[in-house]
Image (cartoon, coloured by chain):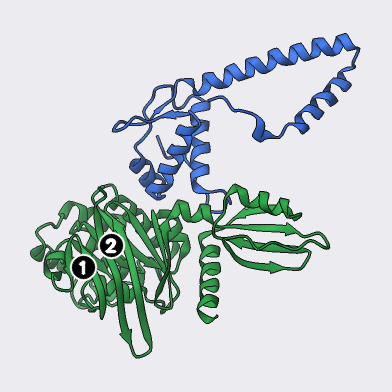
Chain colours: A green, B blue
Amino acid sequence: MKNIAVELKGVGKDYPHFRLQDVNLKLETGTVMGFIGANGAGKSTTLRILMGLVHQDRGEVTVFGSRMPQQQALAKRDIGYVSEDLRLYGTATLGWHMSYIRSIYPGWDSAYAAHLCRHFDLNPAQKIKGLSTGQRVKASLLLAFARRPRLLVLDEPTTGLDPVARHEVLEALMEAMRDESRTILFSSHNTHDVEQISDQITFIDRGRVIESDDKETFLDRWRRFRLEVPPGVCLPVLPGTVATSGSARLAVVTTSRYDDSLAAAYTQAGVSVKSVDSMTLEEIFVANVHSKREEVAA
Amino acid sequence: MLNDFVISQTDGRSLYLQIMEQIKQKIAVGDWEQGQELPSIRQLAIELMVSVITVKRAYFELEREGVILTQQGKASTVAASAELGRRICEQELRHHLADAVRLGIKLGLTPEQLVSELMRAALVMPAEEVEIEQ
């Protein structure tokens, strides 16, 4: 049986101007899930609910079997959470924060903390207020990582980082996954980062999860066809068609249910297949969001 | 041992295909020998900074192609027959070509005519129909 680290069932939350609706997610132990959505899509709200920081109006949330928010004290020992709104004391040094966290969490790994300091190019003697944005993000990650929690919940860990710092953070994330019992859930609007290191991918838009699948399946299912439609031939609408664009003679069809039979079906209908292109996660995300928004509007 | 892998984001091909190709190259040039253990899926994923599921996919496809062997609970190894199978195919190809040339000479065909015959044969046989030996 697969070990489930995190599970959300029918989770919802109502705000005056925003509704999170029927969020269902399942995250296996030992995997990395990338949580992709535009700004304001509901990523942070979902992660806060998962942490017990926001209480859901509907639905069930369990983290390592503990119900959230009721049993959050128990679950939180195993979770490392990093987000933008996490405050560090400006007048204290990074080293002070490190010993503070060490005094609370028995699992603190001093050798690993020292390693991360070097890896992230951080100086423990430096005061937080003297750190750049990127250094602050890295300091927060260090404080969460060095506790060696079983679950890392990271809200936009790479946003606002320069390319070198981004690389360092992704490297540290992958390194943390050396331990097979560790699980990572991270949100981002950078599909590049997500595409590279995630096993599972979840798209969220306007408060709804629009798709969640393992990455390889995701990338396999989506394709773009360039088709030439001879005069008098009607372009068939095949199952899985998400979008159709182009002219009457040269059509571009995006599908979310690609397999080899699709090209054959077009050929049979008298349409000539010019190319079948794979898509990047970003292209898939944008196509997906557009089609789902149209569905809702219709 | 793994730092010579190059994963490109702008390559246009799936990451798993890039990994497969580079593993095959390593085996072809003898960097990785028959029976040698491959790094674990997780280890390679971390080294290459790609997801575990991507490397898993690459290993799965390599296994299907008979390039590597995976036994439950053990490290994957380079299949003994990976290079051998290819060499056998190449030998067979040369053998058949020699036969074809012999027949061509019998019929009085020029080398150019033989080449065009071969081209025609290659074009009428779609690649899907060829059973690739594992």
Do residues under tags 2 and 1 come within 8 Å of each other at their CB atoms?
A: yes
Residue A206 higher or lower than B73, as above or below:
below
Q: Is residue B75 visible?
A: yes
* A228 sits left or right of A280 in the view: right
Q: Which mark is residue A94?
A: 1
Q: Secondary structure at mark 1?
A: helix
Mark 1 belongs to chain: A
Instruction: Residue at 20% x, 74% y: name it.
Output: A52
Q: Nearer the viewer, residue A173 or A73?
A: A73
Specify the quadrant of the image occupied by residue A100: bottom left
Q: Which mark is residue A122?
A: 2
Going by the numbered disc 1, the residue's amino acid type is Leu
Instruction: Residue at 75% x, 68% y: name it.
Output: A247
Q: Nearer the viewer, residue A85 or A73?
A: A73
* B73 sits left or right of A166 in the view: left
Question: Residue A66 at what x, y percent from top left?
Answer: 16, 64
Give the residue at the far bottom of this rendering.
A16
Q: Secondary structure at mark 2?
A: loop
Label 1, residues with CA under 10 Å away: few <14, some 14-19, many ≥20: many
Going by the numbered disc 2, the residue's amino acid type is Leu
Residue B56 higher or lower than A252, as above or below:
above
Question: Residue B109 at what x, y percent from top left?
Answer: 90, 16
